Image (spheres, helix red, strand yellow):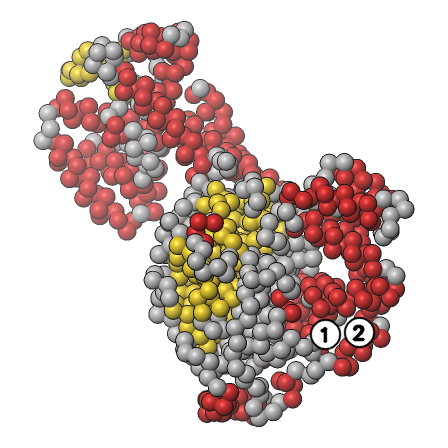
Amino acid sequence: MACQGLQKGETLASLKRECDNLKKKLEEERGKLNDVELHQVAEKTEVLGALSVKTRRVLKGHGNKVLCMDWCKDRRRLVSSSQDGKVIVWDAFTLNKEHGITLPCTWVMACAYAPSGCAVACGGLDNKCSVVPLSLDKTENLAAKKKSVAMHTNYVSGCTFTNSDMQLLTCSGDGTCALWDVESGQLLQSFHGHTADVLSLDLAPSETGNTFVSGGCDKKANVWDMRSGQNIQSFESHESDINCVKYYPSGDAFASASDDATCRFYDLRADREVAVYQKDSIIFGASTVDFSLSGRLLFAGYNDYTINAWDVLKGTRVSVLFGHENRISRVRVSPDGTALCSASWDNTLRIWA
Amino acid sequence: MTINTLAKGGWYREQMTCFRKMEKVIVAMQDPDMGMKMRNQRLLITVIPHAMTGRDVIDWLIQKYNICEEEALHVGGMLVRYGYIYPLKEPRSLVLRADETPYRFQTPYFWTSTRWPASELDYAIYLAKKNIRKQGELMEYEKERYSLLHKRINHTWDFVVMQAREQLRASKQRRKADRIVLECQEQAYWLINRPPVRSLTLHYSAVLYHTVLSCIESCRRALGRNRVKSSICLEGFVKFSEQYQNHDPIMQGCLPSNPWISDDTNTHRLERWSFSFMELLNDPIGRREFMTYLEKEFSAENLCFWQACEDIRHGESSKIIQKVEDVYKNFLAPGAARWVNIDSKTMDKTLEGIKHPHRFVMDDAQLHIYFLMKKDSYPRYLKSDLYKNMLAKAIVPQETKKSVFPFMRRQRHSSPSPAQAVTQVTEEDGRAMGAGKAGTNSLPPSPLSLLVTIVTIQGVLSVYSFISD
């Protein structure tokens, strides 16, 4: 037994050296095709003026920190989940609370609206992600119809439906992502590669729609093939946990938000980081990002209670949105790009337009 | 269903069940009636109580579990490797010898499972104690680690030294036998949890080995990737943003073709159909128009086939087999009513796949037809009279008119929830829009009061922004 340990010990050191060498080579390869920087290419585009974006709605009703939200495809409804275990479906126009679901666990960290608009998925500290069909019958107890779909061995940090109501993609504190069949609860594919908690994921808006990106506490952002479960690309340039990842509208790139107070932009075809959005005056970590419809603006929510809007191409900050009284947990642009919704630990959600 | 157990968290969980089992054995060994006979051992000049010989351990295991000597040696050896039993005479030799070598049970306080993971701070305190107690008592590898720790957790170094001194002082007040026992236990714990580099225990080597191997594999794969020059990629972003800029409501500061206002097709929406085939297909009205066009060209079966494949991909699992059969009958079978033109290679592959139908069995054929439509019918549609007439008749969205009151506010209505009826979302008759008031939960204001509000707050600002444009 002891000898086997020794053998492994010897090869381990040489393996580590090989790994470091390969990483260096990879960086060199990536650097070879780096012939221009993003802000240089963007010099000819016009400078953006300050945004005239204001709070148009404040959604009050949660009893505790709002941890997550998601828009419905009809562009006016949204679902939000909170630390008090409640999941609420709102009509953001009229500020009506259309459905309220109470879950037995606290810290519902993930919620998503189904593409059809007929169900929502939610999960968190219960290590599960459940799907709840929405019914307009007010007397019906929605929580009773809740169906457990995903089972992880640690908290569920993010979830999203794929292109249909039938499949659910989740990421978890156990370091894995998984694809589930909603009807049967079967695990269709699991994705291993992160060496720490996975905090966020996003589905690619591509024509063939078969990849997604995930980011975690191991400072890595990984791109996965949904069918094979393989890790296609990996990016490791953040200096701390990655809290959120989001694809650029064309699907050729994605952005990430991290505890190191920066947001970064990664190009998938060039296979490297192409921009870093940071400022000396921004000290607190960024917890969430989303692109505007054209991809020109990047909205990022920070732990210092503000939302910064960045010019994606030029790398400069365009605006700061103040209003929340505690950290921002999630920002999402509506499906038609007309509004931005932010969820915060101050128990409210705000719609900006 | 458990997901990977070799990932860090999962590994720990797996090891924990092993630890629990080992602990059961240890507890049984120390049972007053059925357990092992302990005796006092002489260590140099001090007598250590509650010790046993290696032979005792083997014999007990053989007797209790009805196994042979070799297996007992193996199991006992594991107990030593994981620190539940430690040798008294040669602490660094973590093997179980089937002779008179003395061993002792590790106290539960120092079980690996109790104090998982071994903290850097504790290790630093331990090494500091050793260093203070007797200069030169640290081994080479311990000296290296001590200086590394000194660098790494320099900010708490005062605390470390203080703790070490306190613990040494407290131990001096104990009886010598107890002190030696405690020192042995602590030493045994650290030999397991911070072994000298060369002889990595199973814990670390298994996990590290695996992580490093997978890292190497992904690096190799990444090196083989095709990459595109930055200038080309980045130009792509600039172009995309420029193309969609006018359609980005947040950037324009007002709301063009807002589906919340009206569902009429307007130039903006129609323009987007010309950006890419996917834009056309994603818009339900676009898809409908395209279908009309294809019907005129007698190639509608392509779009019907594509839609049927989408239905299979995204629909309920229980209906897949039936749907695949229907698609085969309607589109792929020789002499089918709406036969689609697929190349023979793809057709053969699909027909093979149909024998064992699954969600993605139609993917290749679907993609083939998708690209066929994209290359052929789609460009012709964009040049067609059908599309051009639509563009001509379409409403120009109000923001391009640049009037003083940039947009009309209409009264808010609630729209039917999608959960109510599964109809096409765009065909709702909801006509609602956001107003300028920040955060009110009140009844929808009358149009007149809205206009007044707009003029006083929004109107002024908007007028200003247009002037400054």
Q: Residues within 10 Å of mark 1 (few under 14, many from 20)?
A: many
Q: Residue B456 in the image: x percent, y percent?
A: 46, 92
Given residues B120 and B353, the one toward you in this image is B353
Classify mark 2: helix, strand or loop.
Answer: helix
The numbered dot on residue B270 is 1
* Quadrant of the rendering where the C terminus of chain B is positioned: bottom right
The numbered dot on residue B387 is 2
Given residues A126 and A278, the one toward you in this image is A126
Residue depicted at 19% across the width and 23% down the height: B181
Residue A252 seen in render: yes
Above or below, A344 against B411 in this view is above
- Left of A45 or right of it: where is A264? left
- Left of A281 or right of it: where is B297? right
Q: Quadrant of residue B15?
A: top left
Residue depicted at 66% across the width and 54% down the height: A209
Asked if labels 2 and 1 share a chain, the reply is yes
Given residues A240 and B293, the one toward you in this image is B293
Q: Quadrant of residue B177?
A: top left
Given residues A281 and A51, the one toward you in this image is A51
Residue depicted at 59% across the width and 49% down the height: A167
Which subunit holds the residue at mark 1?
Answer: B
Residue depicted at 69% across the width and 63% down the height: B282
Q: Earlier in the sequence, mark 2 or mark 1?
A: 1
- Left of B26 or right of it: where is A38? right
Residue A296 seen in render: no
- Do callouts 2 and 1 mark residues in contact (Cβ within 8 Å)? yes
Disc 2/disc 1 C-alpha distance (Å): 9 Å
Above or below, B190 against B315 in this view is above
